[in-house]
Amino acid sequence: MKRLALVLGITLLAVPVKADLTHKIQSSVQLTVDGAGSITTRLPSSMTVSGSNVTLDTTPVLGTLSSGTALGYTPGAYSITTAGDAFSYTESYIEGDDVPTVLSTTVTSGVVPVLPIMGQSTTTSGGISGSLAGSVATDGAISITAGGAGTTVIGQSVISIFAGD
């Protein structure tokens, strides 16, 4: 009886406690398939001539630009101005890009089948989803399946407990 009175007395004298606890469980899956793309820049035709102690006899000429043909170039003719003196002469020509027949690209299943190839081209291949998959079950279990090239799958589970007022 004394024990029962002691337990009852302690229970009645106990101070109530407030405990604000927050428990969160968040699970997610993120699937990504890279996109294909192509960036190109047409390069122009250019010609440079430089020299010292040389005289221009015939002017170098760039041809007329027409699609599907080279621009064309006729070099100049030069002679030494003062015979016996040192001279230098440089003439250069760079053929620019033709007008492309492919002006844009079409992406089919992550692949760019035809590309406009020009003086400066940067192309990235797209991803192929393949068997890419991910899910979160009702019990929080994460299931992920890798895809083909250019794919990413991220499974994440965050558990947090917050105690405060």
Image (cartoon, rainbow, N blue to C red):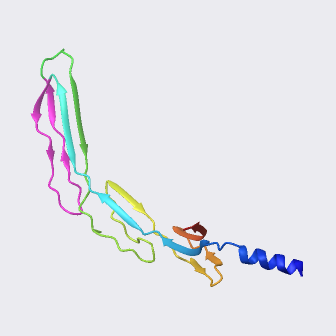
Name the one closer to the observer, 67 or 120: 120
Residue 135 visible at all: yes
**Res. 84 image quadrant:** top left
* Residue 19 position in % (x across, y down): 62, 72
* Residue 1 position in % (x across, y down): 89, 82
**Res. 136 image quadrant:** bottom right
* Residue 56 position in % (x across, y down): 11, 31
* Residue 98 position in % (x across, y down): 25, 59
**Image position of 164 with respect to 96: above or below:** below
User: What is the magenta range?
Assistant: 54-80
Q: Quadrant of the C terminus?
A: bottom right
Residue 131 visible at all: no
**Image position of 76 with respect to 65: above or below:** above
Total marks placed: 0
Name the one closer to the observer, 161 or 163: 163
Residue at (22, 49) in percent of width and height:
45
**Image position of 153 with respect to 97: above or below:** below
Task: Please identify the residue farthest to the bottom as the structure is shown.
Answer: 138
Task: Please identify the residue farthest to the top as the structure is shown.
Answer: 84
**Image position of 90 with respect to 32: above or below:** above
Name the one closer to the observer, 81 or 97: 97
Is-magenta flag for residue 68?
Answer: yes
Left or right: 87 in relation to 133: left
Is-magenta flag for residue 148?
Answer: no
Residue at (15, 22) in percent of width and height:
53
Residue at (62, 85) in percent of width and height:
138
Residue at (26, 52) in percent of width and height:
43
